[in-house]
Image (spheres, rainbow, N blue to C red):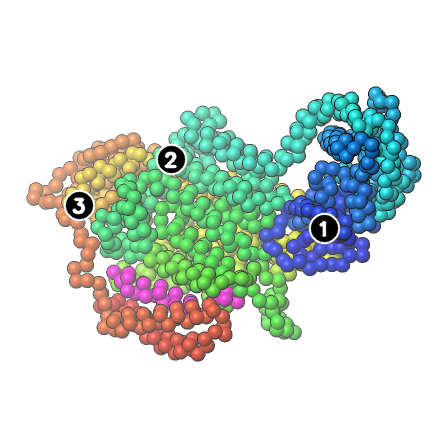
Amino acid sequence: MRQPDGDGVRMVSGGSSDVRGDKEESEVPFDPDATGVIPRLTFDEEPSGRGPGPSSGEPAGDGAPADGNGDGGVSDGEAPVDDADDDERAADQTATFRIPSALHIGRPPTVKEAAELSAAGTVSMPVLSEPETSGDGPAAEDDTAAEAAEATRAVSRTSIALGADTPGGAQAEDVSSAAAPVAEPAPKPEAKPAPTPAPAPAPAPAPAATPERAPESGAATASGAATASGAASAPTVAPAVAPEPAVEPEPVVEPETAAAPAPAAAPAPEPAPVPVAAPPKRAGAAGGVMGRIGALVASAPKWLPVLLVLEGLVMYVLALKVPPGPFRGVDPADIDGLGLISALPATAFLAILIMIVSFFVTVAQSTDRKFLLLFQIAAITFALHGAGALVASEPRFPTAYIHAGFVEFISRTGESAISIDARMGWPGFFALFAFVTKAAGIQDMTTILQWTPLLSNLLYLLPFVLILRQVVATTRARWFAALLFVLVQWIGQDYFSPQGFTFALYLAWVAILLRWFGRVEPRTKPIPPKGLRRLIGRLDAMTPGELANTGTFRADKLLMFMLLVALFLASVASHQITPFMMLGVLTAFLIFKRTSLTWALPFFLGLAVLAWISYMTVGFWSSQIDAIFGGLGNILQNLRSNTGDRIEGSDPAHARVLQARLGILVVILSLAATGLVRRLRRGVFDRSALILLCVPVLALGLQSYGGEIGLRIYMFALPGACLLAAYAFFPNLPADSADVREETVPLRRRNVRFNPQLTKKLSVVLAACFAVLFAFAFLMARYGNEKFERVTTGEVEALHHVYANDKPSARVLYLVPKLGPEVTPTMPWGERDVEIVSFNVQALVHKDPTQIADAVKALQEQPRNSYLMVSRGQVSYLQLNEGYPADWGERFRAALDASPDLKRVYSNPDAALYTWKKFVRGTETPEPRPYKTPRGEPTSPWTPVGIAALGLTWATLFGYEVIRLNGPNRARKARRRLLYLAIPSFVVAFAVIIERFLYIAANN
């Protein structure tokens, strides 16, 4: 960058800066958030010996024009761009302009100030001569001088407002009086002379500074604002003044081209500026309107994205909420095997497209408009993840209702019961909402269930954006990764559930690890000469893709460490898989040296997970050891249960939905691999992003998790995958770092590189195309099951009938195509009375709707107050996933109505309830099964010893880690003593946990 002497234009960069001419390079500390060209205007209070620098129109070094078209100029607040440099170098500079005091107060400098400016090497400019005393007295002299100066400033401001080019090609210049001559003479075109007897004296000829040579010499006028280059000056008109002796001003010499000084006239006692100012005012009236329109158009990048996103939001809400029509509204009857996308109007797709375009218009700008970008992503999140809430009359996803039932049970009884459901062995999430709803007096959780998916995804954005702030990436890469995170999160685990809640805890956990406990150290060891160790050494020596934590106070670290432990313990008490994901990420960060924490923490946290499973969920695993550990190591079988088994035997239209889900997975992983390679080509190794992507895949070695372990892996791998996928389009380092390269790399080792400006635009366009593709694929993947995941009012009312007649107990049978333990009812079950109403009985049905014998037999075997429920959601599930006929539901209900053994007790268009018509006399409805174990939970002989060892281990490891936060060399002896206590106590606690598994499983 150019940096003239004195206080001239100074280009300040967050990284290395190029200095043209005889200037030297300057190193400035690296700032990862420095994006865009942000000019700062600073004003000198008083002119000093060092001449204040010119405005943006000053001469460029080496004779380059200052019009922004050459390499040395600065135009429109942008730094000069070299064709060989990266396109983001110019966009990520910060310019500081120092304006002389004489200019920012609105007057030309005096003779003395002009001399000081000339001595400092700046451009020449009009000067305000100091009048001599006359015989009129001091008061008259002061009044005359003040009036002349005011007239000069008024005419100068009028001329600046008329800055457009004249029809003759000459640019309008400052109109000054005889007391303020121009720095460069210009030939006067024909103009109406002022009605005064004495015209203003003509300036002396100056061949070296003609208007045609002004752009080449780099000179420019400085009358409060710089004129555009390449245009000649407009005629200078002098107001009529009385003849007075002229005062010869001191000559002002320009740094390169010396122009002859123009004479200055003494101020007239009676200035007449009205005839001269009238024509500019008439021209300025028309120019002012056009100027405002031009300014409005020029400022479109600021207000256009806001207008677009608001327009898209309004259009989207109207498209989904208004009554159905040709291009509006959603009719649930139109939903088919493709899901909700088959019923959305065209205006909804157009609204999503407008919001995505608004996002990329903002991203393409050279400034980081954080709040606007976050609002745009939130708007897109509302459109995609809030569509179900806008369309459905009841909360979607049937499983959310059973979770609401757990909350209701804990709120009513004050305790959890693992004998009712295994998920209540991890009651942290349910207990939290039980406390909130009871404290707030909430009786109906319908609204909470309705909007939880949208609120969950908005909550995910906050810690994920904090994660993105800790990576070394451009602004475009960071915000595009955030958008991808919203677009490809289709798996639907964000409903009212523990996994959706603990995923937010997981993201916050990772953000704290990177932000407050991140570690980035350059490699100091030499790289081995050959073999695998050489490859690992080269990767280790690359530029880190993360930012190190610096400048954090010890109190802040202690607070965040305690929050880290609290988040982990909350996830341990709420979900089965999330703690293992957290523990895996922490262990990988320690192995690859990306955290300043020690190995004491993973042992502390790992023991907490094992202790919870061993002591708090014994009622679940004591009789189901095979179900828990039977799937360990069966990677291929677990993978097949989450991919191929979900596509076989499906409806043709619905099969495309499942293929679209796998397609999104393949594309996002391919983009992540591409981004990783492009970063490696630039010498950057993103260890943290790679860890976040790969660690969740290890969960395939656990168990199938009811056939849904693949969905959990995809959800936890999304942060790393989206970040690496963004690098596929924007792989560069920030422009304020030391390593800045163009968007492309050499093709086949040839020195062929594309134009950086062209590749910048192509990258944005390609990213926008992929974003639109992902958005429309999201609607198909996320809402492809809408035909049976959508809950209707009729289904809810049918189950409310059961809840109203469930004393002392009740049972509901649900339809399945085959009997098995991993089939979940596709109806809104368990919303109330989870300990009274049982949903554990299945009724086998066949593709032939007239074969009802198995279903009738299953109902006959149940006691009184048992119901066989036929609902729209169950029928749709059988049709889409099992290939049942389209009219199967109507024909099956007709066959049940015709059965002499069944009685229909409730019916509406969406659901029907059937019960056994005749019971044996004397049979009564049984009491509900007790949810408390009469003899208590099973235990082992060494359990008390294990509990004591657990407490000692946690205390010592926690104390060790807290002391270690003060520094690696602090209190070494104390930490060593704590380890002497922690290691044997850990061994004893772990041995007792193993003993409990073996002893309790053998005796139950």
Label 3: element kind = loop
- Tag of residue 809: 3
The span from disc 2 to disc 3 (Cα, nearest Å) is 31 Å
The span from disc 1 to disc 3 (Cα, nearest Å) is: 82 Å
What residue does disc 1 label? Answer: 10
Q: Badge 2: few (under 14), some or many (20 or more) residues near its Cα, within 10 Å?
A: some
Q: Position of residue 707 (x, y in %)?
A: 38, 53
Going 76% across and 45% down the picture, which residue do you hit? 54
Of badges 2 and 1, the one in the foreground is 1
The magenta-colored residue range is 593-619
Reply above or below: 878 against 596: above
Q: State the SS at label 2.
A: loop
Number of the label disc, if any, that sits on residue 392: 2
**Above or below: residue 360 compared with residue 318:** below
Left or right for 966, reference 921: right
What is the x, y in percent for residue 546? Answer: 56, 59
